[in-house]
Image: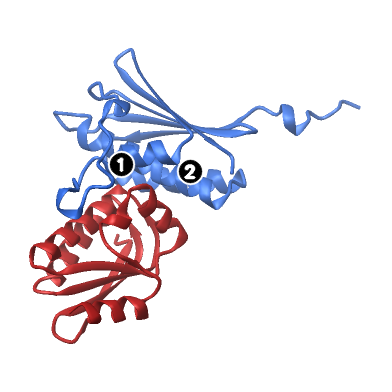
Chain colours: A blue, B red
Amino acid sequence: MIPLASPVEAEPRELKLSLRSTLEEIARAQAAVERFAEAEALSEQTAFALQVTLEEVLANVVHHGYEGGGAHPIEVRVRAAEAEIELEVVDDGKPFDPLSMPPPKLDAPLEERDVGGLGVHMVKQLMDEVRYRRDGGHNVLTMRKRRG
Amino acid sequence: MSQLEIETEKVGTDVAVATLKGRLDTNSVASAEKTLLEASDGLAQMILDLAGVDYISSAGLRVLLLVAKKLKTGKGQLSVCSVTPRVKSVLDISGFASVFPIRADRQEALAKATARR
């Protein structure tokens, strides 16, 4: 009898999505990631963190990535390993390193709070690791979240 | 497709409670912004009941901030109540506890709002 591969050594499962750079695509991507999270039995907290992160990153790309507008391709990859979930977003927009953004003034009084800049901050807080690289005309944002 | 419903109820002349149901996200914030900014006109106190909101992103936070700022300009105040744990976690990591009061429930929010007038 051929032994079955043990679950520990199983290949990480992947979800790949090819999106267009429109805001409507965010809901479609989130629905797919939600199904993936359910299949992976991720905790509600981890699944929620992935949903919010996905929206923040995609909204940033759509809003700021393309000067001329038009629909550009955005690739989303979610990879579920034993200990962590990896989320990668690749776009061909203008170079943008979200990690270079100054942190928002979180303790400022209401009058001085800026209405922007919170998305990147939230991604950094919700994920355990966020890395950016520019690769062959593409922005590649790789994020990791430990399974909770 | 609207993923967010807002129902506004006036309490007296210058206090209102808006009950939100659904998602406060990129795709729902444009209508939410318009509805809430209009509803907050001339109010001394506006309470957002968020019991039915299970998702909020920075786009949603932006709307809350805009409404809070508008009320403050007219010497009014925004408060939120009945926040779900998920939404609370987002408010916490974004430092929104210093932006407006977060009340346990509608009763407490109304009591504080009417006491402040």
From the viewer's side, name the closer residue of A98 and A55: A98
Q: Which amino acid, by three-letter code, is at mark 2? A: Val
Chain where mark 1 sits: A
Instruction: Give the residue at x 13% y 85%.
Output: B13
The residue depicted at 78 percent of the width and 28 percent of the height is A5
Q: Position of residue B62 (x, y in %)?
A: 23, 52
The quarter of the picture where residue B43 lies is: bottom left
Task: Name the residue: 14% across, 65% down.
Answer: B71
* Residue A77, x across and y down, in percent: 46, 31
Mark 1, residue position: A119
The extreme top residue here reads: A136
Same subunit, tags 1 and 2:
yes
Q: Nearer the viewer, mark 1 or mark 2?
A: 1
Q: Position of residue A146 (x, y in %)?
A: 56, 36
Q: Check disc 1 and report its element: helix, strand or loop.
A: helix
**In front here: A119 or A111?**
A111
Tell whether B62 sits left or right of A16. Answer: left
Note whether A79 is above or below B106 in the view shown.
Answer: above
Distance in Å between CA atoms under marks 1 and 2: 19 Å
Mark 1 or mark 2: name the one nearer the start of the chain: 2
**Circle 2: is it few (<14), some (14-19), or many (20+) Cα within 10 Å?**
many
The answer to whether residue B98 is above or below residue A125 is below
Name the residue tied to disc 2.
Answer: A33
> In what element is the residue under mark 2?
helix
Q: Residue at x 28, y 77 (%)?
A: B112
Q: Quadrant of residue A23?
A: top left
| Res. A32 in view | no
Using the image, tell me which numbered label, if any, was put on residue B43.
none
Q: Chain of mark 2?
A: A
Of the 4 image quadrants, the one containing the C terminus of chain B is bottom left
The N terminus of chain B - image quarter: bottom left
Q: Nearer the viewer, residue A135 or A1?
A: A135
